[in-house]
Image (cartoon, rainbow, N blue to C red):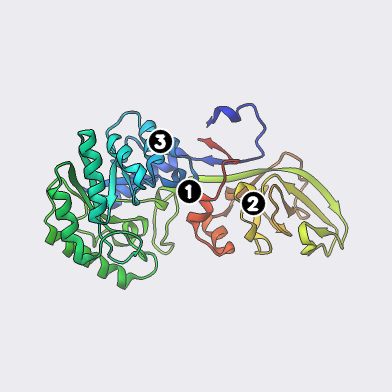
Amino acid sequence: MISSPESENLPSRCWAEIDLGALRHNAKWCRGLAGPGRGLMAIVKADAYGHGLPEVVEALSEIADWFGVANLREARRARAASGGREQGILVLGPAAPEEVEPLVDGGFSGAVSLPEEVAAYEAAAARLGAIARLHAVIDTGMGRMGCLPDHAAELVATIRRSHHCRLEGIASHFPSADEDRTFTLDQIARFQAIVRALAPEEDCHVHLGNSAGLIGYHDEMSGMTLVRPGLALYGISPLPDERTDLRPVMTLKSRVTLVRDVPAGTGISYGRTFVTTRATRVATLAVGYGDGYPRHLSHSGASVLIQGRRCPLLGRVTMDQILVDVTDLPLVSRGEEAVLMGAQGREEITTAEIAERTGTIPWEILTGITSRVQRVYL
């Protein structure tokens, strides 16, 4: 078990246990699903979906061929954590103008949508006497970045003509692989046709598949040389009806800090939106929305696990504390462990359940867990 130096010898009030064995298992499962001849780009942006970018990169450094990040700072952190190995590191989004030259200087790969972006990389690489490694992004339905299909040939030709740029990849992204199978199958076919027309060099990577694409469409994606799982690495399938062998990586825990017996008619938390209807034993837990436990869980039917049983959340989630009903449990003591997300005994509260109760998605739940929550690596 590894903890960050600044947290050593301090009591744990709220912490996230990160199972690196489960993470590696998931990465190997994704690689196996992708099939032979396809590399694995592990998506580690947003602090590896809240799991800790340096620790995740280090754990996957002998499994992943590439790492996908969101910006220059994440690229540098990934490189530092990779132990000097030669994985590619792709900044998935458009680079800010001031990031272009440092990206080239650092040997990182950039994603481009427009010829003017290529020109900026060409100028930076010329000043440095270096080569800019570029992935041409084609917008086949996401609408967020990328050139439109009719301009793909122009974008790729611009890169090929540039003296200091190399076409390292051709990419696109799924907008609805977890929702719209008809559109997604058509999108795959359109992207494949575009790639064939562009006739990429043998060493040019072709990639489209995120977690939903990998799990739901791996048999349809001929011609792809990389897969880009994100959520699946962390043990959650964006296609819950598809059978997988994924293992949850994060368990979010807190401790009971106070246990009080209150009579019927007692208001609980801000706004007195919950009032007890019976004599109730109420436990206070050291977690709140300041830790990333969503305020929208208030009055959603949410529970936490104590002694392997679900204990209902009472009233509103506050910044630093929540209150739960432990009336029906055996004696609950201060300092006792509570599971907010994960398994305890035979019960489990999944990230997907929390997301559904708050009206959001698992990605937001994971990335919303704040730096105040100590990460403990198993």
Label 3 element class: helix
Q: Which residue is mark 3?
A: 77
| Residue ID at (23%, 39%) | 125
Of residues 97 and 357, the one nearer the viewer is 97
Give the structural element (helix, strand or loop) at label 1.
loop
Q: Position of residue 327 (x, y in %)?
A: 78, 54
Residue type at tag 3: Arg
Instruction: Give the side of residue 47 with respect to residue 30, left or right.
Output: right
Q: 1 above or below 300?
A: above
Would residue 63 be visible to someone looking at this image? no
Q: Dot 2 surroundings within 10 Å: few (below 14), some, or many (20 or more)? A: some
Per the model, the C-alpha gap separating discs 1 and 3 is 24 Å
The residue furthest bottom is 182
Name above or below for residue 4 compared with residue 147: above
**Horizontal arrangement in the rendering, residue 56 relative to residue 28 (left or right):** right
Q: Is residue 39 visible?
A: yes
Mark 1 or mark 2: name the one nearer the start of the chain: 1
Q: Position of residue 49 (x, y in %)?
A: 46, 47
Q: Which mark is residue 289?
A: 2
What residue is shown with label 1?
248
Please tell me which residue lies in front, 267 or 73. 73
